[in-house]
Image (tube, helix red, strand yellow):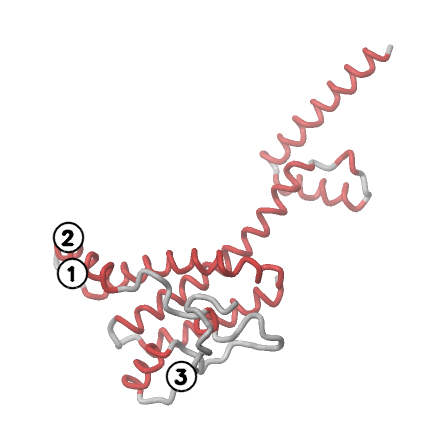
Amino acid sequence: MPGLASARESAAAAVDGRRERSLYDEDFWSWTQEQAGALRRRDLDAIDWENVIEEIETLGRSEKRGWTSLCTNVIQHLLKMEHGGRRHLRHWRREIVAWRVTMFRKLRSHPGMKGELPEMLAEAWEDGRGDAVAKLVEHAGPRNWAAEKALRRSWERRLPEQCPYALEDIAGYDPWESGAAPNSGVWPAPVALRMNEELGEDYPVRHRAPSRAAGRSR
């Protein structure tokens, strides 16, 4: 009977759906192996489409978060180098150089993410500025909670509201320039001048074209 057959198929599909959700929730590794096998066999009926799509999107978001987190660290350090104490300048410089290389490799491996750079940079600036405020307060060593609160308000006022750095000066290269790679001599002008004054080394200040807006390069 057509009606009975249809009901049986619906019931079977519901059971399969519950099993997929249960395996996905309870044994994710086994779920990945099962789904990989189904994809290799081109067994479309065995694929847990909803969760497979979700996991693929999650992987993409993870790569974006990785680059954004590194960019956040660079921005935090640049702000501290420009506005804070000078005792850690050499150490901060080394960390930035290492982070830039990792950022470069991520974009080289995932060039499609370049279209997301404005969004990622905006997020990194917001987080990096907040982290810089917290670290600058911490470095000052406030004696009590009231002093800490006053320092936080002071640094919130002193640091720029909008990102003053071009993307090239954060990443150390222009991500849209073919064959370009991070250059350890590229720094925002105020940071380079601070390093020249403190470290006595020649950190060349690269001048951007007038059409380049701070915080982006395209």
Q: CA distance from mark 3 to mark 1?
A: 34 Å
Q: Are marks 2 and 1 in contact (CB under 8 Å)?
A: yes
Q: Residue at x 44, y 74 (%)?
A: 169
Q: What's under tag 3, amino acid-wise? A: Val
- Asked if residue 16 is positioned above or below residue 93 in the image, the reply reads above
- Find disc 3 in the rendering and name its residue: 205
Indicate which disc, 2 or 3, sits on the residue closer to the N terminus: 2
Question: Left or right of 176: which side holds 183?
Answer: left
Q: Position of residue 146 (x, y in %)?
A: 12, 53
Q: What's under tag 2, amino acid-wise? A: Trp
Indicate which disc, 3 or 1, sits on the residue closer to the N terminus: 1
Label of residue 17 in the image:
none
Q: Are marks 2 and 3 in contact (CB under 8 Å)?
A: no
Residue 130, picture quadrant: bottom left
Q: CA distance from mark 2 to mark 3?
A: 40 Å
- Asked if residue 186 is positioned above or below residue 54 in the image, the reply reads below
Label of residue 145 in the image:
2
Q: Residues within 10 Å of mark 1 (few under 14, many from 20)?
A: some
Which secondary structure lies at badge 3? loop
Question: Left or right of 198: which side holds 44?
Answer: right
Q: Residue at x 26, y 76 (%)?
A: 87
Residue 143 or 23: which is nearer the viewer?
Answer: 143
Q: Position of residue 160 (x, y in %)?
A: 30, 64
Q: Residues within 10 Å of mark 3 (few under 14, many from 20)?
A: some
- Find disc 1 in the rendering and name its residue: 142
